[in-house]
Amino acid sequence: MIYKVVNSYCDDPNEQEDLVQEIIYHLLDGYDRFNHHSKITTWMYRVALNVSISFFRKSKTRKKYIGQMPEKIMEIKEEENEPMDKEVLQFRQFIQNLDELNRAIMILYLDGNSHEDIAEVLDISVSNVGTKIHRIKHRLKEHFKTI
């Protein structure tokens, strides 16, 4: 679950590692304050999404002031992974281009969470969740029609 959230909010492997550590830290630090009124996974999603959104915002600000290091200074050998299917890459890019709330909704929805659980994690109404999912699906259909 944590990796799904992290992969949706940043692409840089180093930043992903930092974000995973930050989420785990917040989960461990906040567990004593967990009130057990909701499911543990709901609480974990809420923590993971809140930390990721904060990290994402800070990252965007940081990137304004920090330039990229030229590629020719050093060469890092990339891991050889199985290439992703073209449609999977396009779908992942579509999700990454959603705003923060809609991206969080899609992560939770694709992970099989109910509308009620999504509403609880994101602190929005169940009907709002349904409406947003419907709109995202419609945008997704339109997006793939044009490709």
Image: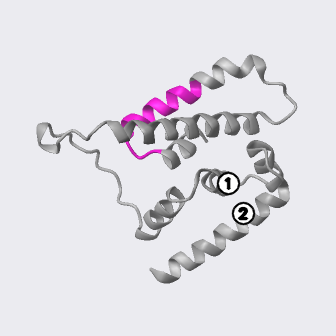
Q: What range of the chain is rendered magenta? A: 10-24
Q: Relative to residue 143, is residue 122 depicted above or below?
A: above
Q: Is residue 139 left or right of residue 18?
A: right
Q: Is residue 112 left or right of residue 35?
A: left
- In terms of depth relative to the viewer, which is nearer, 3 or 105? 105
Q: Are there few (<14), some (14-19), or many (20+) residues within 10 Å of tag 1? A: many
- The residue at 65%/75% (across/down) is 138
Q: Picture coordinates of residue 107 (x, y %)?
A: 62, 52
**Mark on residue 105?**
1
Q: Relative to residue 136, is residue 5 depicted above or below?
A: above
Q: Picture coordinates of residue 58 (x, y %)?
A: 48, 35
Q: Is residue 92 magenta?
A: no
Q: What element does badge 1 sit on? A: helix
Q: Picture coordinates of residue 3 (x, y %)?
A: 53, 41
Q: Is residue 17 magenta?
A: yes
- The residue at 72%/21% (across/down) is 31
**Residue 43 quadrant:** top right
Q: Is residue 143 left or right of residue 134?
A: left
C-beta proximity under 8 Å, tags 1 and 2: yes
Q: Are there few (<14), some (14-19), or many (20+) residues within 10 Å of tag 2? A: some
**Mark on residue 132?**
2
